[in-house]
Amino acid sequence: MAARPITVHIPPELRFFLPARHRQGRLRLPHDSDATLGHTVQSLGIPLTEVGRLHTQGRTVEAGHRPDPGESVRVESRTWPQPAPTSPPRLLLDVHLGALARRLRLLGVDTAYDNDREDPALLAQANAEQRVLLTRDRGLLFRRALQAGAHVRRQHPDAQLREVLARFAPPLDPWTRCPACNGLLDPVTPEEVAHRLEPGTRATYDTFAQCRGCARIYWPGAHHENLREILRQARHHTPPPEQEHGWGEGPQA
Ligand SMILES: [Zn+2]
């Protein structure tokens, strides 16, 4: 006689990871004496980076727990804000999140990003620099070697920014990082950079900063207002985590 199936309860905010036939959230699965709970959850399409506590028969268990036949398991999503390996958190964005990277840097969040990076290099950098790897590609989050990662659910960069700020609550320090390379900005005098400016710029502005990484020069130009708006939105529209539930946009095939 086959062993009794196990029952797994998936909360609404994680159901968009599930195959369509499982979206009701209460799954009866064949018992597999070899499978850990973590393996079972991942086999349903849910990266463990998105999973919080696991409960079974009234107690909390680890992902390595092996359910008995007939056991009922409840999966929780991670509570936000969540801790990162470092404080303040350091982030690494995958190649598709360039617009988000720029926004985070403008707010002073340490955000590594390169638009030409293979997956193994991303994983290696995330681990070596203790960065949280942010991606919309959940395949990356299933990599066993990855120490810290998070799935970005929203598609629009402004919405992604609000999501990341709600999830990791990084301290914001606007205008301190280079949006192009993540380097720190130092104030410089107009005289120091005069030879590199157009005459009109030199005449109009007296506040300049220079990137330690790439030596680009910044001043409060026309784009400043756009950046101010991003900052305003980030500060005033960061929703509390409980409002984030039910965000799922579904896998974008
Ligand atoms: Zn730079």
Image: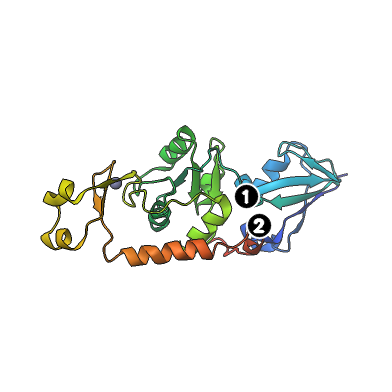
Q: Nearer the viewer, residue 141 or 185?
A: 185
Q: Residues within 10 Å of mark 1 (few under 14, many from 20)?
A: some
Up-down: is 193 above or below 251?
Answer: above
Q: Mark 2 and mark 1: span between their CA atoms?
A: 8 Å
Left of 64 or right of it: where is 140?
Answer: left
Q: Residue 80: percent from the left, percent from the top?
A: 63, 52
Q: Nearer the viewer, residue 4 or 176?
A: 176
Q: Which numbered disc, 2 or 1, marks the residue that appears first in the sequence? A: 2
What kind of element bears circle 1?
helix
Q: Nearer the viewer, residue 119 or 134?
A: 134
Left of 184 or right of it: where is 32?
Answer: right
Asked if the residue at tag 1 contacts the one at tag 2, i.e. Cβ–Cβ closer than 8 Å, the answer is yes
Instruction: Locate the N terminus by quadrant.
Output: top right
- Picture disc at residue 244: none
Direction right: furthest residue: 1
Residue displayed at 57% across by 37% down: 144
Q: Residue 166: percent from the left, percent from the top?
A: 57, 56
Residue displayed at 79% across by 46% down: 55
Q: Amino acid at mark 1?
A: Glu
Q: Residues within 10 Å of mark 2 (few under 14, many from 20)?
A: many
Q: Amino acid at mark 2?
A: Leu
Q: Residue 206: percent from the left, percent from the top?
A: 22, 57
Residue at mark 2: 14
The answer to whether any part of residue 253 appears in the image is: no
Q: In the rendered image, which quarter is residue 230 located in?
A: bottom left
Up-down: is 61 above or below 197?
Answer: above
- Picture disc at residue 50: 1
Left of 31 or right of it: where is 123?
Answer: left
Residue displayed at 49% across by 45% down: 133
Mark 1, ligand 1, within 8 Å: the answer is no
Q: Residue 247: percent from the left, percent from the top?
A: 60, 64
